[in-house]
Image (cartoon, helix red, strand yellow):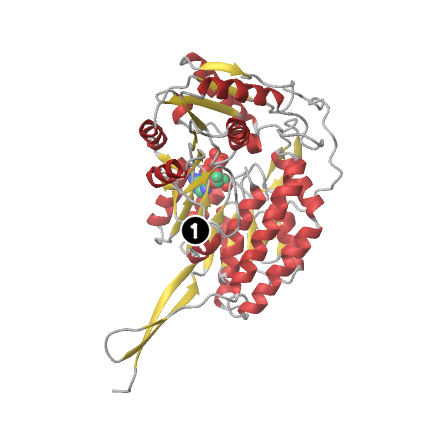
């Protein structure tokens, strides 16, 4: 691997951390308990800042503020056009602050700065513009009912939306949830991931500078079993949207059910197949299979983590996939030209190394990688396993790291059987030049997204979500919008009786 940057001498980010408190009712405040917790630099394991640690009491305060802003206004009582304009202004302001925001994101998460600044923050801006555009275009139907009644439907916000996000794409997932929730007129309490609390506080401040009224968007940093659980089980939260692991998704759904039955959107884990057919353009497939897995240090719920290759092109594919991984540029994510930074934290780092050991022990062929890079922080060599069998742990469980697992199939029937042999069903990649093959696979795959001859295309308008244990409901696009709206039927007689 080319480690173009000296991993052990991290570059100093030229930014000051201004916001580390909770954002409740438009004010930065300490946690009620006075407690705080450290957030770490994944490049070194050093503390970047200490952040207020919200728990149940702070969630109560935040929900009360959101409740008031919903019930008494101003948010749902503003015209939709006014709400839309505030969201557009925020998108503009965010765009102006791309450098600072991307710096925070890289520092707290470890992702390459160029990826944050050139891909992710622009996607966040686009997402807010997309949903700002929807805010004043939400309307119901008139329904031709039997009998002498006029029937209409109103599409109304739920009220207070509780949003829980993970650490792998802190701001992108912020936009996927905060965007549609606010566009529909809900108010929000957001619980960020404990590993990456910084960027959401910074941009939420910008949102208030754009004219967002106090109480409409509250941000609570803190841990899952305390702050996250309190939000999930809160009796005054009317809608929940969660992105994270399948195990935590089950807990959150249970908490929602056992409290007030709030509807829940879940975007959970995956073990997505990337299917390379015999007629695929191999060089392109190698490159895309590589990025499908290694993008964001392998920390994507939709990572193409099972590379399934037709036996006739398998040897060539493995050789080229290995060569590509060896060329991957790993280093300090603040340097230019870096493709891969460190993993998020020590826990994930150890977990990934454990999966690598399990791959070796279970008899998969380690083509390249497998070790830590450098002596500080959480860098892992781009790792490629071939000869991976379906019953191996590395073929079944989500690794969430830079570990590509390649296995072989002999025909389309076997490809489908292998692809669907998972409790997950988030996404799949299909590589073929043959339209019939593409159509056959597309219909057969039990997943929420099929990318044909491409991967990881995340347009604001395209729905995203999982089949099976990868989740329920959809985010982005009009489908994501509808998950923040409830339908009221209004019936009146045509003539007074
Ligand atoms: P990951 O493995 O990505 O850290 P988690 O699902 O544990 O996955 O975390 C995703 C989000 O869920 C984080 O914001 C985390 O704090 C939160 N979380 C973790 N446990 C709980 C819980 N018991 N209740 C509510 N939220 C939780």
Dividing the picture into quarters, in which one does residue 349 lie? top right
Identify the residue at horizontal 74%, vertical 41% (top origin): 15
**For the C terminus, which image quadrant?**
bottom left
Instruction: Say which of 59 and 471 sits in front.
Output: 471
Identify the residue at horizontal 44%, vertical 17% (top origin): 359
Position in image of residue 324 (x %, y %) = 58, 23
- Residue at which label 1 appears: 240
Q: Is residue 404 visible?
A: yes
Q: Is residue 450 left or right of residue 338?
A: left
- Image height check: is 391 above or below 253? above
Position in image of residue 188 (x %, y %) = 51, 55
Q: Is residue 440 left or right of residue 38?
A: left
Position in image of residue 456 (x %, y %) = 51, 39
Dividing the picture into quarters, in which one does residue 267 lie? top left
Dividing the picture into quarters, in which one does residue 13 lie? top right
Q: Secondary structure at mark 1?
A: strand
């Amino acid at each position: 691997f080319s480690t173009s940057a000296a991993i052990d001498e991290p570059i100093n980010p030229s930014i000051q951390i201004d916001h580390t408190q909770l954002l409740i009712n438009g004010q930065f405040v300490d946690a009620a308990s006075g407690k705080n917790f450290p957030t770490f630099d994944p490049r070194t394991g050093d503390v970047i800042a200490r952040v207020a640690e919200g728990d149940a009491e702070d969630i109560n305060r935040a929900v009360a503020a959101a409740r008031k802003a919903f019930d008494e206004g101003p948010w749902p009582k503003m015209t939709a056009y006014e709400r839309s304009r505030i969201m557009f202004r925020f998108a503009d302001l965010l765009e102006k602050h791309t450098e600072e925001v991307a710096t925070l994101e890289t520092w707290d998460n470890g992702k390459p700065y160029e990826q944050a600044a050139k891909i992710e923050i622009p996607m966040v801006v686009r997402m807010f513009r997309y949903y700002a555009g929807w805010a004043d275009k939400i309307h119901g139907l008139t329904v031709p009912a039997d009998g002498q009644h006029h029937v209409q439907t109103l599409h109304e916000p739920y009220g207070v939306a509780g949003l829980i996000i993970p650490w792998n794409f802190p701001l992108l997932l912020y936009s996927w949830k905060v965007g549609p929730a606010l566009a529909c007129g809900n108010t929000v309490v957001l619980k960020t991931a404990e590993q990456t609390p910084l960027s959401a506080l910074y941009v939420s401040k910008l949102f208030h500078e754009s004219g967002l009224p106090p109480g409409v968007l509250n941000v609570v940093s803190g841990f899952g079993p305390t702050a996250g659980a309190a939000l999930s089980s809160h009796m005054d939260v009317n809608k929940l949207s969660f992105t994270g692991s399948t195990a935590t998704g089950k807990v959150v759904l249970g908490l929602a059910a056992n409290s007030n039955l709030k509807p829940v959107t879940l975007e959970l884990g995956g073990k997505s197949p990337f299917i390379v057919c015999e007629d695929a353009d191999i060089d392109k497939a190698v490159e895309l299979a590589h990025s499908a897995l290694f993008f964001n240090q392998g920390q994507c719920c939709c990572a193409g983590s099972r590379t399934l290759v037709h036996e006739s092109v398998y040897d060539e594919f493995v050789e080229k996939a290995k060569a590509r991984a060896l060329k991957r540029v790993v280093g300090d994510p603040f340097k230019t030209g870096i493709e891969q930074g460190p993993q998020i934290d020590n826990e994930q780092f150890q977990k990934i190394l454990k999966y690598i050991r399990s791959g070796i022990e279970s008899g998969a062929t380690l083509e390249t990688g497998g070790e830590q890079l450098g002596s500080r922080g959480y860098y892992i060599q781009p790792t490629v396993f071939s000869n991976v069998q379906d019953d191996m742990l590395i073929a079944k469980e989500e690794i969430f790291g830079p570990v590509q697992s390649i296995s072989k199939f002999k025909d389309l029937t076997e490809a489908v059987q292998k692809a669907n042999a998972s409790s997950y069903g988030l996404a799949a990649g299909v590589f073929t030049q043959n339209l019939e093959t593409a159509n056959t696979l597309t219909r057969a795959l039990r997943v929420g997204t099929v990318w044909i001859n491409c991967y990881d295309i995340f347009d604001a308008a395209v729905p995203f979500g999982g089949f099976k244990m990868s989740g329920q409901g959809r985010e982005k696009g009009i489908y994501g919008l509808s998950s923040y709206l409830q339908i009221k039927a209004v019936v009146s007689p045509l003539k007074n009786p």
